[in-house]
Image (cartoon, rainbow, N blue to C red):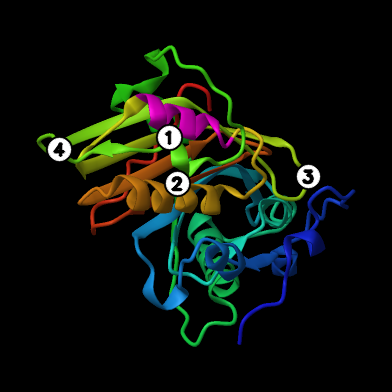
C-alpha cells in the first residue's frame, strides 16, 4: 500500500515547535513515485542504481549521566526505497534526540537505522535497511573537504538563456570516436519544491559513449536555476535527460548539494553497479 503524503502536508514553510525528546513520529516520508512517474520512470524497472547520501552535522544526545554527546552521522538511502524523507522533518527528528538519554553511540545508531528504515520503506511489500554510520568527535578531522574530480565546465564562457530544465540543450557527436570522461560544475542551483528557497550544489557527470557537447551540458545544468524540485528528483531528471538525449553507454550523475539546517543531501545515480562516491564535502559545504 503506497503513502498518500504530499510535500504540501509536511512542515516545510511552517512554524514548528522544536521537540527535544525523542519522537520518531516527526519523520515525514514522501513517495518518490509522483515525481518519477512525471519523468517516465517506473518503480518496477528503475533505469539506474544508486543512493541518496545524507550527512547530519547536528546530532547530539545525553549519556546515562546526563552529559551531552556529539556525532556526525552519515546515512545511505538506496534509490529503490519507495519514499524519501522530507528534510525539515528529518531535522526535527534529529533535534528530538537532544535531551534524550541513550546508553551509547551504538544505541543511537540502531535507533536511527530502525526509524529511518521503517519510514523510507513504509508502504512497500518488503522492508530492508539503510546505512548509518556515526563519526565520533575524535574523528571529525577525518571529514574530507575537496572539490569534485573532473573537467571543469565552468571555465566555458557561454550565454545562458534558460532557467527551467531544457533537455533540448543536450547533444552528443556520434560520428566521432567514443570517449570516457568526467565533467563537473559548481553552478547547479534549484529551489525547494514547497518553499522556493534556493538549494545550491555541484554536480559531477561521468560517462562513456559519444562525446557530449560541453557548452550545451553546462547550459543545461544552469537551466535548473529557477526549477522547484527536491534534490533527489533533480538528479534523476538530469540522469534521464542526459541518457535519452546523449545516448551514452554508461552514465553516472552525482549531485552534491550544500548544507542547510545541519543536513546535506547528495543523490547519486548510475547506469551500472559501482561503489558509492566517497562521502566528502566540497569547499562550498
Q: Position of residue 63 (x, y in %)?
A: 63, 53
Residue 214 in view of the camera: yes
Q: Earlier in the sequence, mark 1 or mark 2?
A: 1
Task: Determine the CA span between mark 3 and mark 2.
Answer: 22 Å
Q: Determine which quarter of the picture holds residue 130.
A: bottom left
Q: Quadrant of the N terminus?
A: bottom right
Question: Residue 175 shows which numbered tag?
Answer: 4
Q: Which residue is mark 1?
A: 203
Q: Are marks 4 and 3 in contact (CB under 8 Å)?
A: no
Q: Which residue is mark 3?
A: 195
Task: Residue at 31% x, 47% y: name it.
Answer: 252
Is 232 situated left or right of 64 in this image? left
Q: Which residue is mark 2?
A: 238
The residue segment tinted magenta is 215-224
Task: Determine the CA span between mark 1 and mark 3.
Answer: 23 Å
Mark in the foreground, 4 or 1:
4
Using the image as rendered, state which of residue 140 and residue 282 is in the foreground. 282
Is 178 situated left or right of 29 in this image? left
Task: Determine the CA span between mark 1 and mark 2.
Answer: 10 Å
Amino acid at each position: 500500500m503506497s503513502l498518500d503524503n504530499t510535500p504540501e502536508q509536511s512542515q516545510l514553510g511552517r512554524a514548528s515547535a522544536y521537540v527535544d525528546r525523542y519522537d520518531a513520529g516527526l519523520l515525514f516520508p514522501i513517495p518518490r513515485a509522483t515525481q518519477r512517474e512525471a519523468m517516465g520512470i517506473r518503480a518496477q524497472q528503475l533505469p539506474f542504481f544508486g543512493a541518496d547520501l545524507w550527512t547530519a552535522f547536528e546530532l547530539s544526545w545525553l549519556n546515562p549521566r546526563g552529559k551531552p554527546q556529539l556525532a556526525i552521522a552519515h546515512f545511505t538511502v538506496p534509490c529503490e526505497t519507495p519514499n524519501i524523507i522530507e528534510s525539515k522533518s528529518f531535522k526535527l527528528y534529529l533535534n528530538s534526540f537532544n535531551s534524550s538519554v541513550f546508553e551509547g553511540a551504538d544505541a543511537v545508531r540502531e535507533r536511527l537505522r530502525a526509524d529511518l528504515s521503517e519510514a523510507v520503506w513504509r508502504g512497500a511489500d518488503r522492508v530492508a535497511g539503510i546505512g548509518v554510520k556515526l563519526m565520533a568527535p575524535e574523528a571529525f578531522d577525518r571529514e574530507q573537504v575537496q572539490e569534485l574530480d573532473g573537467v571543469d565546465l565552468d571555465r566555458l564562457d557561454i550565454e545562458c538563456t534558460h532557467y527551467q530544465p531544457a533537455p533540448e540543450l543536450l547533444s552528443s557527436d556520434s560520428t566521432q570516436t567514443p570517449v570516457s570522461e568526467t565533467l563537473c560544475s559548481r553552478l547547479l542551483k534549484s529551489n525547494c519544491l514547497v518553499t522556493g528557497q534556493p538549494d545550491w550544489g555541484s554536480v559531477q557527470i561521468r560517462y562513456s559513449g559519444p562525446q557530449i557537447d560541453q557548452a550545451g551540458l553546462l547550459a543545461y545544468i544552469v537551466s535548473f536555476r529557477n526549477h522547484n524540485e527536491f534534490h533527489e528528483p533533480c538528479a534523476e531528471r538530469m540522469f534521464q535527460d542526459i541518457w535519452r538525449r546523449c545516448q551514452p553507454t554508461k552514465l553516472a550523475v552525482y549531485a552534491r548539494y550544500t548544507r542547510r539546517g545541519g543536513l546535506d543531501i547528495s543523490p547519486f545515480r548510475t547506469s551500472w553497479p559501482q561503489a558509492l562516491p566517497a562521502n566528502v564535502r566540497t569547499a562550498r559545504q
